[in-house]
Amino acid sequence: MDSEPKIQEYHPELLFNLPKNYGSVGKPVKGVSNVSMLFSELRIKDLTLKNRIVCSPMCMYSCEDGLMNDFHLVHLGSFAKGGCGLIVFEATAVQSEGRITYADSGLWNDAQIGPLKRINDFVHKFDSKTCLQIAHAGRKASTYPPFLGMRNVTIPADDIKNRGWDIKGPSAVPWGEESLVPAEMSIDDIQETIEAFKATTLRAMEAGFDAIEIHGAHGYLISSFLSPTSNKRTDRYGGSFEGRAQFLVDIVRAVRSVLPSSVPLFVRLSCEEWVKDGIHIEDTVRLAKILETMDVDLLDCSSGGNSSNQKIAGGPLYQVPFAERIKSSTRFLTGAVGLINKPNEAEKILREDKCDLVFLARGLLRDPFWAIHAAYELEVEVDNCLQYSFVDKRYMQGLRSSIP
């Protein structure tokens, strides 16, 4: 019986010689003078991004045992072919019980390295850089994939399909009415989780990532430690502002202890909790000043997610002021997120120095070639994916009127 055929990887350098004036998809054509801020390079430590367009981490809830698969290769590969400068892989659990759902990505064992490396290798062929968001869901763990219609409903540990597990958090405070009460983490639990972030970072380096992002937002474990609405502890990991920040501080220290100094480290934060007694931007600025001393390079400025009682004042660019406030109050580079859909808006917030990178999510799901279309709208000549370069400018200009 014949053995299974070997997976044929894409190696353009073995197939053809690149045109002399070709750079990479989403990068301004060599020699052009009209380069917008959105398509300017950004250097962070030893990492150089070809443009300021970032694919934000988006959970797809499509893994088995934490292993990424062909869905993720095509999903993330599309954004590389579409010209994103940086692609942040979805929240990847540092422990099996740290998954949001049973179908989350994970990197708590060595078997999970290979599938990630396969995707990394493909993305890098288009000169897009990669970042892994490492995470622990805490009290928001053990739930159903949200597209099944049961968002934030906790699956009990004795679930008949064996798809649930016991959840833990900083305190025995549930996230919402349909959530189970988490067990309060012991000091040993906390130390094991900190070590798990460290071990996952080492595996991420083996998988070929160019940067790491610690997920400290949206009500997951780190975020719930930071907030007084969910952290009722009285030991060194609770009580005062400094106590509630200690868990994140210890994780940053552990990750940095094994992350090469040349590799950028990002932290995503919920800068505003959108509840009266929760975290507000002034608290986040205070936290940022602590992280400034710890070799963190960029803060990814999001909001919300830690309370089912949140009242979000949403709308286009509604979270940009958080990135602007952090940037103006600290030495940090910042990433702006949240309903940034129009290229001229992305260009404007960069030119006004409100952020350094623009993180896109839904916009890229609607249009994986958002970067190429943005370039034409901003009248910046960029390289297309080489195989798609037969699409001429006249055709692309005809698309401008249909760009949202």
Image: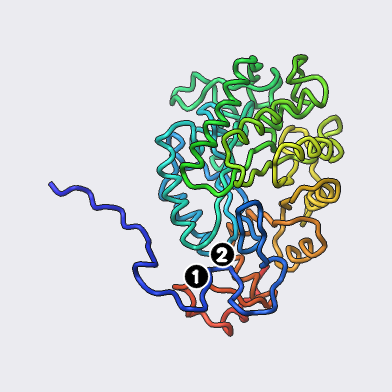
Which of 293/244 is in front?
Answer: 293
Q: In percent of the image, x 60 and y 15: which residue is there? A: 188
Q: In percent of the image, x 71 and y 21: which residue is there? A: 173
Rendering colour mode: rainbow
As displayed, is residue 347 above or below residue 269? below
Determine the secondary structure under disc 1: loop
Q: Residue furthest front?
A: 261
For mark 2, does the 10 Å Cα neighbourhood hold few (<14), some (14 to 19), or many (20 or more) residues? many
Determine the secondary structure under disc 2: loop
Q: Pinpoint residue 268: horizontal percent, then vertical percent.
A: 69, 42
Q: Pinpoint residue 5: horizontal percent, then vertical percent.
A: 24, 52
Q: Quadrant of the C terminus?
A: bottom right
Q: Pinpoint residue 64: horizontal percent, then vertical percent.
A: 43, 37
- Indicate the quadrant where residue 364 lies: bottom right
Q: In percent of the image, x 58 and y 82: which residue is there? A: 393
As displayed, is residue 224 above or below residue 261? above
In the image, what residue type sits under mark 2? Answer: Gly
For mark 1, does the 10 Å Cα neighbourhood hold few (<14), some (14 to 19), or many (20 or more) residues? many
The answer, for residue 30, to whether it is visible in the render is yes
Q: Which residue is mark 2?
A: 83
As displayed, is residue 399 above or below residue 330? below
Which of 397/37 is in front?
Answer: 37
- Indicate the quadrant where residue 115 lies: top left
Q: Which residue is mark 1?
A: 385
Q: Which mark is residue 145?
A: none
As displayed, is residue 400 above or below residue 322? below
Left or right of 65 in this view: 128: right
Q: Are marks 2 and 1 in contact (CB under 8 Å)?
A: yes
In the image, what residue type sits under mark 1? Answer: Cys
Count numbered badges in the picture. 2
Q: Pinpoint residue 22: horizontal percent, then vertical percent.
A: 51, 75
